[in-house]
């Protein structure tokens, strides 16, 4: 059964320096509050995994938490570049950032393999691109048909962190709307933390909802508003204006540092 | 009614979609073109966004690939591993739309880096869904403004495969889709030569000359002998296009 914790306790207990951590979310349900807690607790040397590292990964990278990024698309959706990610890659600031780059299909398959406790996944992908020269992918022959297929190593994060609508007091998590790879990320990870909008006595059924039973989740923490500026289906809308504003903040080291100080370091969890 | 070159691009792209066409759509011009097709000649065009929304029918143009409205209006919402495995890789998608920072004469695309990979001059967002969209959709449509910096002799990085190094490359690589069937630019439309698979100028937009398109291309662009001219956007197309708005444009925040 998942332990109900505060966000501060959850990050302190589950994430250590040097861990491999996946904070997943596909536009919807991005665990911003948990990312901010990682920055506040000063985690260093993390390997961060995510298909679509966006603003929260830009913040973690700019704040010096990350040593490596495993990803498939790193941008500010609908706006442009992630300037902290770019400065880390292009100029090694605030420190060098190692990249392991994939495609969405490769990352998604690798998470699914991790969730299935398999060592690797196969897919029809990567062939003919320059990605294989720069990332961990091999090509294998199908033992039945001989078709040449790409193989990617399963993703097995130390910690998977996702945000969901709600959980009950036993730590059963209910999540609906666009569900991304959150289920796979939690099941692939050795430990998991789910932040939720609210903890309720009983989960009312919602059509199409995913349930993560409390016994596959390590800890659940209430973090109302914890996905902002991303959105939570049924709770609040995406703050599109923030994503636009982030562009100017993240372009400038000082403006970025100021923003982190004001909105993360000096803000309570 | 006068129109901008961007409107011409959206209209030209939308005309390639038919009622019932299943499209894998990205944000920006592709999403505009697909929603325009749905609002005009192809109401049954099926829109799939890589966030897992199948058959999305948004009233407003989405601002992100995973807007709530896409989920609310979709026939089905599935996870990301499923959208790529069961739907894209399985060969169920007719058209994939792609943009890029660079394209070469064989329709190969770069959306990864400008400069050297390990020491890039510009680190771009990366491939995302593009490599497998280009591999597995039955056809790929590229929408891209034409300039010598974008239409290049040699890509800095090959993120997605069009026709690789030329005839036979897709078959050799085991890529199931037909590859890039059209590149829609602000100047005209390029299509692959049926024998060499080199992109050639098939059509210019009204008011554009072939010389302008050649000058905006970083390789010696061949012009088809039967060069055509795009039909300008009709009043109905322009009205429908201009009626497409994001939710924020309809109700400005704050």
Image (cartoon, coloured by chain):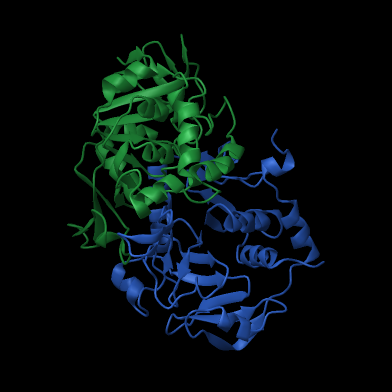
Residue A173 seen in this snapshot: yes
Write down the quadrant of residue B22 in the picture: bottom right
Q: Quadrant of the C terminus of chain A?
A: top left
> Any idea which chain is the green one in this picture?
A
Residue A262 falls left or right of residue B235: left
Residue A73 seen in this snapshot: no
Write down the quadrant of residue B110 in the picture: bottom left
Residue A53 versus residue A44: which sits nearer the camera? A44
Residue B127 versus residue A138: which sits nearer the camera? B127
> Any idea which chain is the blue one in this picture?
B
Q: Residue at x 17, y 57 (%)?
A: A143
Furthest residue to the top? A201
Q: Vertical placement of B238 versus A213: above or below? A: below
Q: Residue at x 80, y 64 (%)?
A: B235
Residue A1 versus residue B145: which sits nearer the camera? B145
Q: Residue at x 29, y 47 (%)?
A: A96
**Residue B230 x %, y %:** 68, 76
> How many marks do you count on the picture?
0
Residue A99 falls left or right of residue A268: left
**Residue B218 x %, y %:** 49, 79
Residue A118 falls left or right of residue A218: left
């Amino acid at each position: 059964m998942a332990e109900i914790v505060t966000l501060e306790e959850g990050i302190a207990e589950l994430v250590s320096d040097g861990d491999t951590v996946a904070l997943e979310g596909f536009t919807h349900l991005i665990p911003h509050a948990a990312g901010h807690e990682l920055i506040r607790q000063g985690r260093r040397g993390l390997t961060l995994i995510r298909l679509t590292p966006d603003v929260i990964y830009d913040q973690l990278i700019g704040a010096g938490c990350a040593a490596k990024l495993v990803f498939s698309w790193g941008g500010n959706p609908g706006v442009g570049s992630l300037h902290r990610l770019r400065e880390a890659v292009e100029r090694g600031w605030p420190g060098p950032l190692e990249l392991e780059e994939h495609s969405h299909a490769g990352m998604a398959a690798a998470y699914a393999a991790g969730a299935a406790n398999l060592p690797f996944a196969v897919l029809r992908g990567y062939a003919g691109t320059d990605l294989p020269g720069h990332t961990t992918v091999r090509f294998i022959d199908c033992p039945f048909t001989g078709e040449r297929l790409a193989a990617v190593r399963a993703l097995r994060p130390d910690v998977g962190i996702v945000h969901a609508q709600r959980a009950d007091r036993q730590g059963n998590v209910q999540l609906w709307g666009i569900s991304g790879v959150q289920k796979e990320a939690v099941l692939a990870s050795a430990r998991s933390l789910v932040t939720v909008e609210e903890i309720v006595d009983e989960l009312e059924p919602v059509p199409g909802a995913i349930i993560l039973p409390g016994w596959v989740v390590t800890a659940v923490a209430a973090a109302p508003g914890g996905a902002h500026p991303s959105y939570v289906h049924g709770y609040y809308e995406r703050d599109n204006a923030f994503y636009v504003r982030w562009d100017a903040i993240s372009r400038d080291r000082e403006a970025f540092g100021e923003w982190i100080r004001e909105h993360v370091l000096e803000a309570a969890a | 009614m006068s129109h901008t070159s961007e409107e011409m691009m959206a209209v030209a792209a939308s005309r390639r979609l038919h009622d019932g066409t299943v499209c894998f759509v990205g944000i920006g011009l592709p999403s505009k073109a697909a929603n325009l097709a749905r609002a005009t000649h192809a109401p049954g065009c099926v829109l799939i966004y890589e966030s897992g929304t199948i058959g999305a029918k948004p009233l407003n143009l989405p601002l992100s690939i995973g807007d709530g409205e896409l989920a609310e209006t979709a026939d089905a919402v599935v996870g990301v591993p499923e959208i790529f495995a069961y739907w894209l890789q399985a060969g169920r998608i007719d058209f994939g739309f792609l943009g890029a920072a660079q394209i070469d004469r064989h329709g190969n695309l770069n959306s990864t880096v400008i400069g050297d990979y390990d020491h890039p001059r510009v680190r771009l967002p990366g491939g995302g869904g593009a490599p497998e969209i280009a591999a597995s959709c039955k056809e790929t449509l590229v929408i891209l403004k034409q300039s010598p910096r974008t239409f290049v002799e040699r890509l800095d990085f090959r993120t997605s495969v069009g026709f690789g190094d030329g005839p036979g490359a897709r078959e050799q690589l085991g890529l199931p889709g037909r590859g890039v069937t059209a590149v829609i630019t602000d100047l005209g439309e390029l299509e692959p030569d049926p024998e060499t698979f080199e992109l050639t100028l098939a059509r210019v937009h009204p008011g554009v000359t072939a010389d302008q398109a050649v000058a905006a291309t970083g390789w010696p662009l061949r012009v088809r002998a039967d060069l055509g001219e795009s039909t300008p956007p009709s009043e109905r197309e322009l009205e429908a296009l201009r009626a497409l708005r994001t939710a924020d444009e309809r109700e400005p925040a704050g």
